[in-house]
Amino acid sequence: MSLLHSLRPALTRRLTAGSLSLALLGGFTALPAETRTHTTSSRTSDAEAEGFVDGLIGKMTLEEKVGQMSQVALNTPDGATRDERVLKGEVGSFLFVTDPKEINRLQHLAVEKGRLHIPLIFGFDVIHGLRTIYPVPLAMAASWDPEQVETAQRMAAREASSVGINWTFAPMVDIARDARWGRMMEGAGEDPFLGSRMAAAQVRGFQGEKIGSPDHILACVKHFAGYGAAEGGRDYDSANISDEQLWNVYLPPYAAAVKAGAGSVMTAYMDLNGVPATGNRWLLQDVLREKWGFKGFVVSDWESVKNLTTHGFSVDPKDAAVRAADAGVDMEMTSGTFRDDLPAAVRQGLVKESTIDEAVRDILLTKYKLGLFRDPYVSPERSAAELVSQAQREAARTAAERSAVLLRNEGNLLPLRGAKSIAVIGPLADSKPDTMGSWSLAGHPDDTVTVLEGIRKRFGASATVNSTTGVEIERAQPSIFDGQFESPKPTLTTDGQQETEFHHAIDLVKQSDVAVLVLGELQSMSGERASRSSLTLPGRQEELLEAAVATGKPVVLVLMNARPLDITWASAHVPAILEAWYPGTEGGNAVAALLGGDASPGGKLPVSWPRDAGQEPLYYSHNLTQIPNDPDTRYWDGSSAPLYPFGYGLSYTSFTVERLKTSAEQVKSGGKLTVSVELRNTGAVTGDEVVQLYTHQRSGSASRPVRELKGFQRLTLKPGERKTVELSLDTNDLGFWSPQTHRWSIEPGVFDLWVGTDSTAKEHTTFTVVQ
Ligand code: BGC
């Protein structure tokens, strides 16, 4: 059996009987560990909850305590059933159970039949929706609209809570600066400022005003920390991040999420600078709890406790359990080493019982705050009314419309006007799973509107719409999600069939007034275990695109993907390019509305778009170093500049940004400046623009990035309308962790300031920060 085949079953995630099951590769093999001490002061909550929980802990056996620290996905390989485990108090949480009846049944066992009547907490990856799929998180970040993102996650929380899910494993706030990394799709892109705003917005959306708000669920910020810096963009690879980069780039979105009240944190799979994140006491204790005052609980990632052995960190699973618990992991996801090994380890003095008590306390306090001790059940009628409701669909459509980024629009080809025939071509044009994108585990493809369906509905009355795939895309590797739902399987098996189909597509283009080519990646080509070494359009899509353009017909390229792709040829030859990302359940309607001009594209890139994979990692806020202004000195065989800069995106109208002013030339450290510009819609239609503010500190104890985003606002202006836009610049946002002083401070000095509509903003002034 090939390695691929032997891995395949282990990679399979399946939706079974209303719940999802996931099986991953197991790990192997201890060292005595340091003792974890939580300062009680950093973990206090309200007195009533604490009194209740402390009373309960006083009654619990060691095994019951460890049971609370154990999360289970499915019936375990040792043959014990879910029910047996629940009845014995060996489970504190389930993941992947999504059927309200099953949730109530399991909850009933725990609450009515369990010795201490402790409710379970049900977790699920509600990453961009539960059943109603919203655009993938990278797309939502492209809206540059935190309120919109908060609304989408609030709607997702509504749907998830309606089936009895209490907890989502989101938001993912890992900074991603390498487009090869498949999980770029789950985050907000490359920038810590944008990432922090999106992180806080998502936490507010999921949790509401406080943990336990009705119709909301607990958030889980992940993957703490540095997963996005996986070397070479290879999923799970080590992250080697300097302290300077860690504090200034990778950690800020976590700090923002914790500040926004995130109730749980998930560890990361990889090692950070040599220490696996799941056994990393510095991260989980010193930074998270001591420095940031985090008061929730920490869950490991899937089997990442047991896999401390695979890392060559722990001797055996028992040592792994001890070291994870000592480091600050409160709940273990799936591998069962806590349940199997922690009680004996405590009895042997390898880990203190007080460490266990503190972990259990955090978990039970969260359950208490969520209201699970008061009312653990869900009403199945509620979900019937909520799932893919009209309100959900409307919110999903708005989210998709606001996430799209218009990359090119030569001769104002878009919006489409007067076309009597439209050819809708491409392997993604009518693929429901691919419209949803990865991490849509509980989504139903049948609910989804494809681009073809959306175009037929929007243009069908005035134009003939012809469609075909033209080419098919095949994955080289199995996907972790295979078996759950899949992109349509290739059916063109022979070269002859492929040629016929290719020519058929080009004939349709020739017969039409305009062609819309829907190209990109299969949904399973982004997400977990979906890194790529190249960024080209997979399969023969580029060839198809070039052949379509060669017909001389106007071509619109609609991209469905969740990472920048190599579209350098297209950027020079295809007149209109709309980045739709994976737009979700209502994606087809949203794309059609954008193509028809009923909605106006106003999204902006949350990542720098490379010309070639060889430029990665690529990000705008690099340091100046030597000869900074000549992008042609960095490589001899091409420019180091991006194809499209961070923050870039066009609209159906045009804007000017003028009259940049600051409220003062000097500002005291800790104070605020008001920055204002005049924004004018100089075109003929209403449109959105995102005004962006960037700064650069000219000198200090360390070199600072050439530009850093420090403010933004998305606005809608009517034709001819002018608006004075005021952005508040908080000098606290100018502080940084200096590798010379080893601390975070606002260093006084002269700053450049630019305001504009992307990271190459031209309007410039300076200001000085004084002590
Ligand atoms: C992923 C997490 C996810 C978990 C549960 C892991 O493989 O890294 O992001 O929450 O599975 O699905």
Image (cartoon, rainbow, N blue to C red):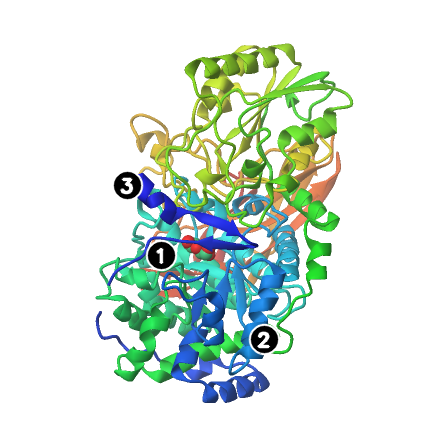
Spatial CA distance of label 2 from label 3 is 46 Å
Q: Amino acid at mark 3?
A: Leu
Nearest to the eye among marks 3 and 1: give it. Answer: 3
User: Residue drawn 26% across and 70% down?
Assistant: 319
Determine if the C-beta at disc 3 is less than 8 A from ligand 1.
no
User: Residue drawn 72% across and 60% down?
Assistant: 381
Q: Which quarter of the rendered image does ligand 1 occupy?
A: bottom left
Decide if residue 127 is on the left or right side of residue 640. right
Classify mark 1: residues with Cα within 10 Å, few (<14), some (14-19) or many (20+): many
Classify mark 3: residues with Cα within 10 Å, few (<14), some (14-19) or many (20+): few
Query: Circle 2 is placed at which residue position?
Result: 369
Say which element carries label 3: helix
Q: Nearer the viewer, residue 106 or 226?
A: 106
Query: Circle 3 is placed at which residue position?
Result: 3
Decide if residue 27 is on the left or right side of residue 695. left
Query: Circle 1 is placed at which residue position?
Result: 269
Say which element carries label 2: helix
